[in-house]
């Protein structure tokens, strides 16, 4: 029950008990034959009227104050509820933002993983040809801008077809994986890039690498492949799997294109193959005459 209802209740209750006792006494005094008693009765009436007025005003003030206090408490409760609701909404919003951030991060991670997988050769783990073409375009433009040499090594496994015929495609895949590991281990310089270009062919891009340095890397990989001693009854050298290498180095000019570098490396590879395989052949710059 509100406080002002309690005050009103006790006021009425007090009057209910006081009036039956006071009114007869006032009547006796007012209607007495004694003037003194009459004056006393009249004074009591005035006094009680004043007291009633004071009590009524006090009661009204107390009730108004109680009403204001109750309204203030209700308003405070309302604002507390609204503040709590706002805090709950902020908490929910923060949680939702964090959840969406986590979902976005997971989505980006999945996308990056899918993109990384799509950029790799599924068998060897090296980059695929699509990525190689993109990196070649980028490195050619950079070499042209800074005026530095760009080298390309093309590696082709000798007589892999006959190896597959003798041992099966599964063994051929294992052979490719082992050779890809050798290539990866020997192309760890910053900027070096290796990719599986086709079935039995690998491409290695060497930025800011001159002809001699690139030929040394090709020779190192050739020797490491030979030392794997992967038995190959149809091999021409040592009865083991070998590889041939074509190395091309160019300092790009505005008149050249990246295709000139690829053609030069292919020409060098052809010369290595014609030499019986298991060797590396290098050219520098554009070649003029191609042997038949």
Image: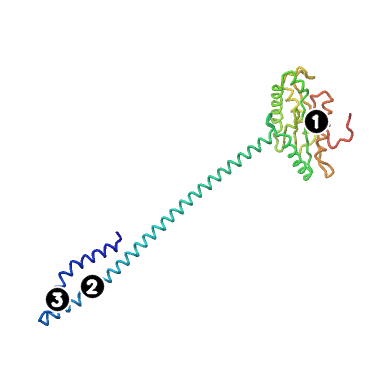
Which residue, given by chain and number where applicable, does mark 3 sit on?
A: 27
Q: Work out how far the residue at label 1 is from the one at label 3, CA to CA, in angstroms.
A: 137 Å
Q: Nearer the viewer, residue 85 or 29?
A: 29
Q: Secondary structure at mark 2?
A: helix
Disc on the earlier residue, 2 or 3? 3
Residue furthest to the left in view is: 33
Q: Residues within 10 Å of mark 3 (few under 14, many from 20)?
A: some
Q: Name the colouring of the figure.
A: rainbow
Which residue, given by chain and number where applicable, does mark 2 sit on?
A: 52
Q: Quadrant of the C terminus?
A: top right
Q: How many marks?
A: 3
Q: Quadrant of the N terminus?
A: bottom left
At x 71% / y 28%, what residue is drawn? 180
Q: Work out how far the residue at label 1 is from the one at label 2, CA to CA, in angstroms.
A: 120 Å
Q: Residues within 10 Å of mark 2 (few under 14, many from 20)?
A: few
Disc on the earlier residue, 1 or 3? 3
Q: Which mark is residue 225?
A: none
Q: Nearer the viewer, residue 275 or 148?
A: 275
Q: Residue 134's quadrant in the figure?
A: top right
Q: Work out how far the residue at label 2 is from the one at label 3, CA to CA, in angstroms.
A: 18 Å
Q: Which mark is residue 246?
A: 1
Q: Nearer the viewer, residue 218 or 276?
A: 276
């Amino acid at each position: 029950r509100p406080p002002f209802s309690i005050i009103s209740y006790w006021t009425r209750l007090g009057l209910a008990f006081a009036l039956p006792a006071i009114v007869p006494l006032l009547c006796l005094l007012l209607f007495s034959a004694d003037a003194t008693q009459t004056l006393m009765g009249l004074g009591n009436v005035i006094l009680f009227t004043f007291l009633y007025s004071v009590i009524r005003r006090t009661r009204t003030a107390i009730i108004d104050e109680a009403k204001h206090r109750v309204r203030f408490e209700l308003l405070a409760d309302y604002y507390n509820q609204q503040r709590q609701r706002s805090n709950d909404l902020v908490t929910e919003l923060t949680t939702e933002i964090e959840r969406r951030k986590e979902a976005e991060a997971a989505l980006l991670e999945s996308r990056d993983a899918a993109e990384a997988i799509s950029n790799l050769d599924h068998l060897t783990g090296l980059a695929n040809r699509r990525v190689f073409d993109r990196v070649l375009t980028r490195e050619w433009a950079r070499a042209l801008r800074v005026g530095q040499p760009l080298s390309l090594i093309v590696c082709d496994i000798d007589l892999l077809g006959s190896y597959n015929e003798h041992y099966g495609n599964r063994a051929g895949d294992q052979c490719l994986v082992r050779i890809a590991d050798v290539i990866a281990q020997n192309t760890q310089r910053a900027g070096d890039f290796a990719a599986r270009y086709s079935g039995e062919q690998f491409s290695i891009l060497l930025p800011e690498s001159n002809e001699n340095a690139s030929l040394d890397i090709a020779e190192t990989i050739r020797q490491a492949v030979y030392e794997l001693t992967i038995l190959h009854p149809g091999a021409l050298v040592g009865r083991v799997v070998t590889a041939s290498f074509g190395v091309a180095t160019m300092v790009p000019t505005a008149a050249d294109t990246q295709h000139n570098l690829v053609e030069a490396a292919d020409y060098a590879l052809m010369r290595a193959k014609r030499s019986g395989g298991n060797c590396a052949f290098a050219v520098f710059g554009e070649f003029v005459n191609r042997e038949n």
